[in-house]
Image (cartoon, grey):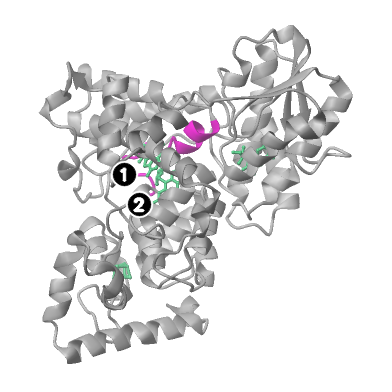
């Protein structure tokens, strides 16, 4: 029986479920660079280059492991435009008896795979993606009957299930959560770790030329592309992280510093999400660093929480909430994002840093995404669907299953509190506490009113005031509403007028001057 195995661009794992228990001599793996995937949003140039180069290297790794690979390149003559078109052409070439594929990572592509059986008149087996700890049913069962889907309780189940950082049936160190210890601002330090830089090889160089030719009008800068594109190089970056950064990962998880793009983060998300690295193996390795006394518990717990907690939880939410999740807009926000989200040309230093590095590298760390670009977008009342598209475009690790619940849910409160129990919004004071950005800014973070006042301040209180009907009853928002109520009516009016003037200027295109 001849089997066709389509392998998608985020399925670059040699142990992929579709490849399990297959007779390699009776299978053709089909990999497809297609215009529909490179074009469904205007992906950052480095994101396209990363995925295509990693795919081409993965095809080599599959061949070396004994698989026959039929690979369609984007610039092949007669290249099909879509996965469905490319699979149809592969069926014509190979006349398979069946198709076996691992489930897709988003609703759009899931619908495609589900149409193939009828369309092609062949049996199509869609296998579960076992690169996750929890499958869809596990998450459903966990969520069933709960009033609130609190990540913390899901995470504890994942700890019990994997045995990670467990001491019998109790959490290692007597606590599940060391977040309170993980909020230290960072000081510049000459010994700060640096992620490895991988010089483009011949395959990557060819892909970079292709991207320059075809996607020069997409966001981001291609120069300086230095992502790993093979599993072996991704493992090297993981080695560097465990050796140099993990010990202080926890302490400085929420810190930001001008010009320091990585701090103590792992910079492994693109490799995990596309399949070059196994997330559970990374967690086991982090635990062994703790057991060997080379990394403290707050760092290791923090790292493991991000992966078996937040990452798995986001996937569960994405699939549970269905294809309409993308349309939720609880706060009724409709403003477009300012044009400078695509250029970084703004005088708000924190935004210039976060956006500038995003355009340079297609990466920013979590707190920049959440408390700088995401925070600002929520404060100005940006349309959550537009914010979602921006994040999906510009980050090298962005696939809808993980990006959408983080952006629309956690960051924009578009789902009304399913993912986060309160909106992640703040005034400039939070950014000042966690970074050195304000020291380098033309605005004064201590001022709320006047031409030099930090725009986050008036925008924050304006957000609080205009959403009182939806948020004042939220227990976790009680404090800001009490503080706002204590302001005199004159002070409230002045704050709201300051915010309105800023938003008017933004709408008038004056945004670039800010
Ligand atoms: P580290 O800080 O070293 O964290 C370790 C690992 O934990 C990451 O590699 C990642 O796999 C995982 N992780 C951490 N936080 C999250 C989270 N909230 N959700 C899922 N996994 C997490 N992450 C993506 O992988 N893809 C996205 O498209 C994405 N979009 C985001 C959008 C917004 C608005 C926000 C606030 C966060 C988003 N994140 C996304 C989560 C997080 O910002 C990135 O995973 C992280 O910055 C990746 O860098 P790192 O590998 O150095 O992570
Ligand atoms: C994101 C992306 C891009 C830019 N290009 C391709 C491609 O040409 N071929 C491919 O197989 N995958 C690509 N991807 C990743 C897919 O969009 C991803 O696999 C789907 O979103 C399914 O989750
Ligand atoms: Fe950002 Fe305001 Fe600080 Fe400037 S002063 S860096 S705008 S928070």
Determine the residue located farthest toward the front in the rendered image: 145
Q: Is residue 25 left or right of residue 347?
A: right
Q: Is residue 426 left or right of residue 333?
A: left
Question: x%, y% of residue 205?
Answer: 68, 38
**Vertically, is 403 above or below 249?**
below
Quadrant placement of the N terminus: top right
* Label number found at residue 418: 2
**Residue at horizontal 70 percent and vertical 9 percent from the top:** 24
Dividing the picture into quadrants, the one containing residue 47 is: top right
Determine the residue located farthest toward the bottom in the rendered image: 490
Give the crowd class for mark 2: few <14, some 14-19, many >=20 residues within 10 Å.
some
Question: x%, y% of residue 8?
Answer: 65, 32
**Residue at horizontal 76 percent and vertical 42 percent from the top:** 82
Disc 2, disc 1: CB below 8 Å? yes
- Identify the secondary structure beneath mark 2: loop
- Per the rendered image, the range of residues in magenta is 261-274
Give the crowd class for mark 1: few <14, some 14-19, many >=20 residues within 10 Å.
some
Question: x%, y% of residue 65?
Answer: 65, 11
For this rendering, which residue is in front, 417 or 217?
Answer: 417
On whether residue 306 falls in the magenta region, the answer is no
Residue that badge 1 annotates = 149
Question: Is ligand 1 less than 8 Å from the beta carbon at label 2?
Answer: no
Q: Is residue 293 visible?
A: no
**Vertically, is 384 above or below 234?**
below
């Amino acid at each position: 029986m001849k089997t066709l195995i389509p392998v998608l661009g985020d399925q670059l794992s040699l142990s992929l479920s579709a490849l399990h228990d297959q007779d390699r001599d009776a299978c053709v793996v089909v990999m497809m660079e297609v215009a529909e995937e490179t074009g469904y949003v205007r992906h950052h140039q480095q994101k396209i280059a990363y995925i295509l180069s990693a795919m081409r290297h993965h095809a080599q790794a599959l061949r070396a492991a004994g698989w026959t690979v039929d690979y369609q390149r984007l610039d092949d003559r007669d290249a099909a435009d879509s996965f469905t078109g490319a699979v149809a052409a592969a069926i014509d070439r190979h006349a398979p008896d069946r198709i076996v594929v691992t489930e897709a990572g988003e609703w759009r592509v899931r619908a495609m795979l589900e149409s193939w059986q009828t369309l092609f008149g062949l049996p199509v087996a869609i296998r579960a993606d076992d690169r996750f700890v929890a499958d869809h049913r596990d998450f459903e069962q966990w969520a069933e009957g709960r009033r609130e889907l609190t990540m913390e309780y899901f995470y504890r189940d994942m700890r019990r299930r994997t045995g990670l950082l467990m001491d019998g049936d109790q959490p290692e160190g007597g606590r599940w959560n060391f977040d309170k210890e993980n909020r230290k601002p960072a000081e510049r330090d000459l010994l700060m770790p640096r992620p490895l830089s991988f010089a483009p090889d011949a395959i990557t160089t060819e892909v970079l030329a292709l991207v320059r030719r075809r996607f020069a009008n997409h966001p981001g800068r291609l120069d300086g592309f230095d992502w790993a594109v093979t599993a072996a190089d991704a493992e090297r970056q993981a080695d560097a992280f465990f050796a140099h950064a993990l010990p202080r990962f926890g302490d400085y998880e929420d810190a930001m510093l001008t010009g320091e793009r990585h701090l103590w983060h792992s910079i492994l998300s693109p490799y995990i999400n596309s399949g070059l690295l196994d997330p559970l193996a990374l967690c086991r390795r982090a635990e062994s660093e703790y057991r060997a006394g080379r990394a403290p518990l707050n760092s290791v717990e923090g790292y493991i929480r991000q992966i078996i907690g937040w990452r798995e939880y986001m996937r569960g939410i994405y699939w549970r909430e269905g294809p309409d999740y993308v349309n939720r807009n609880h706060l009724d926000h409709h403003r477009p994002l300012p044009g400078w989200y695509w250029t970084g040309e703004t005088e708000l230093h924190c935004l210039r840093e976060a956006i500038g590095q995003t355009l340079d590298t297609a990466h920013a760390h979590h707190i920049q995404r959440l408390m700088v670009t995401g925070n600002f977008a929520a404060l100005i009342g940006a349309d959550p669907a537009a914010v979602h598209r921006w994040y999906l475009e510009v980050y090298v690790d962005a696939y809808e299953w993980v990006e959408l619940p983080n952006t629309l849910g956690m960051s924009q409160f578009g789902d009304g509190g399913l993912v986060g129990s309160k909106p992640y919004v703040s005034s400039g004071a939070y950014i000042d506490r966690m970074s050195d950005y304000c020291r380098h800014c033309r605005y004064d973070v201590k001022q709320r009113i006047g031409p030099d006042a930090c725009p986050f301040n008036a925008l924050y209180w304006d957000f609080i005031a205009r959403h009182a009907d939806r948020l004042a009853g939220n227990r976790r928002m009680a404090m800001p509403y009490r503080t706002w109520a204590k302001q005199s009516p004159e002070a409230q009016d002045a704050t709201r007028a300051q915010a309105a003037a800023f938003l008017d200027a933004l709408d008038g295109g004056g945004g670039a001057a800010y």
